[in-house]
Amino acid sequence: MKTRVLWVEDSARLELRNFTGPLYISGKYDLNLAEDATTAVRYLLAKEYDAVILDMRLPPGIDNYWVNIYHQKGKDKAQARLGMELADWLFNGRVDFPSDPPEWIKPHHIAVFTVENDPALRNHLQKLQISIYEHKTAGLPDTILVDLIQRVIAKSINRKNGG
Amino acid sequence: MAIPFDGLITLLVFLVGVPALILQLISVAERRVVVKRERMDVSKFLFWALLFFFVGLSVQIWATLNKDVLGEINYNFIEQGTWVITFAILFVLVLKVSKQIPEQYGQREKIVEKLSQVILKESKDKGHIGGTVFSDLANLGKQCDPGPEREMVVNAFKDLVQGIIADKKYSGDSFEELIEELVHMLVSNPEPKDLCCYDTSIKILAAILSVPGPINSDSDKQRTLHAISKLGRTLLEHFESVEADNIILDYVDSVEFAILDGTKMLTEVSQTIFEIGVCATGAGQDFIAIAALDKLTVLAENRSPLPNEFVADMLGLVAHLWVVEGSRREFAAQKLEEVKILFPKSLPQTIDDARIHCLRTMYFNTADNLEAMKKGLRRRKKK
């Protein structure tokens, strides 16, 4: 069975081919790309994934819940950090979102891949037990997405084996 | 004191002039909607203006005829009071017109918002979107300039879809006209400025596809898949930008929502991906073609036995890559090795079945490519 991957990322436009090309060509992955919080939630509620690669700076999409948060935080992706909000919804017991988070997802399914390099953000993610974090910076290899997925899978296997 | 016709006429002309000016300033499409639907409330304002004008005039005539009875002082008081009051009322009306008409009709957002509210209310009663008001909104979208103006209408479509699918009464058959108009609006005259509309459109279509079952009808989902195919192909043929890659990938990805709660629509989904994939190979967009083929192989996994139509779509897309010599052919050969275990019959026999299916459905190029692939595979085997 192919490895099911959700990549939540809105600004992959320039690197899209480089990053996703290795996934498509290998034929080993079932990849979905969500460009905003609404689409990400839709995929997460509809399907189980082996790995979720999550960006922090996301647009809200069309769901009013995310649109409202985005507006409250000044319509600024960097300030709104909807990726963080998504993680909070998944693992921090947010109650005001209309749907409950899916039961299958655990912090070890997540890898954060973002341009943000804020220690406070990292601490918050650590508190949510999301430990795989890759700072999106210049000079990353084109296989970075595959590498991140492998790290998530390795962690999941490790947990299964009681590590 | 003589009747102040100059002042009165100026105010009356102003009352007619402000709406007329606004009408001239807005686009033809908006003007048509406004005149047809609301008549800009001008008649109401004019009615009141003329009424007060004639009341003032009547009082003036009465006072003139009874000047002797009233006496000079009373006459002057009544005359001046009459025109002060009449002017004051006319001024208030002019101010109202000057404020209200541009607010209501001077901006496209206001017109679109008003129409959307009416459509949403009507459609919740009727159970589907359609009718004269919706036609007005759709015509506004078709006739306006591409880019931000058209995006306003597409956003209104988005709000309508969200409003309807959030309703528990939604039965799965509400968006026939909306989907048709959306496709017509974007496909009939594709413009690079409309790229944002394609982005919003796939969000609308994905929202329709991901309505969880059970719903009474699959009609909206079927129409949505056809719309995704048509819009996706138009994107590939007419838009060349890095942004477009991302959006078209959303088109390929989102079709999966249609089968997440069952495989009933598997062949519609495979046909949509096939059509986009074939278009991508024709447009030299290998990235999208490979993404489409990858999606088909993902869907094929764990869905045994695969319907013949699905197999024809998958092999058909592989064949379009195969016919180009070089690395595309190598990739196609690699894919064939990967998927042949999914077929109950031998690969040549399966390719033949796929070719016959393509002939029947008039995908002649694909049928020819499948034939070429079958012969090529036979030659490879002999070597």
Image (cartoon, coloured by chain):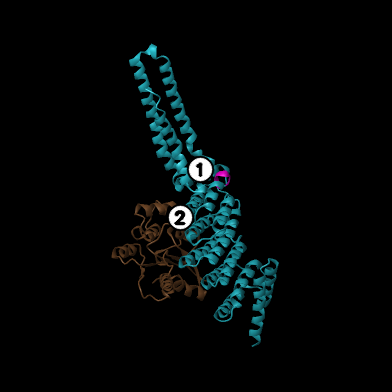
Q: Does the magenta portion include B132?
A: yes
Could you tell me which chain the residue with mark 2 belongs to? Answer: B
Label 1 belongs to which residue?
B34
Q: Is residue A123 left or right of residue A95?
A: left
Q: Does the magenta portion include A162?
A: no
Near mark 1 (Cα within 10 A), the count class, few <14, some 14-19 or many ≥20, is: some
Chain identifier matching the cyan colour in the rendered picture: B
Residues B117 and B313: in front is: B117
Residues B55 and B195: in front is: B55
Snapshot quadrant of residue B219: bottom right
**Residue B148, disc:** 2
Q: Could you say where residue B130 lies in the image, as x and y percent from the top left?
A: 58, 46
Chain identifier matching the brown colour in the rendered picture: A
Disc 2 and disc 1 on one polypeptide chain: yes
Question: Would you place residue B118 above or below residue B142 in this image?
Answer: above
User: Mark 2 or 1 closer to N-term?
Assistant: 1
Task: Give me the residue at 47% from left, 32% from top.
Answer: B46
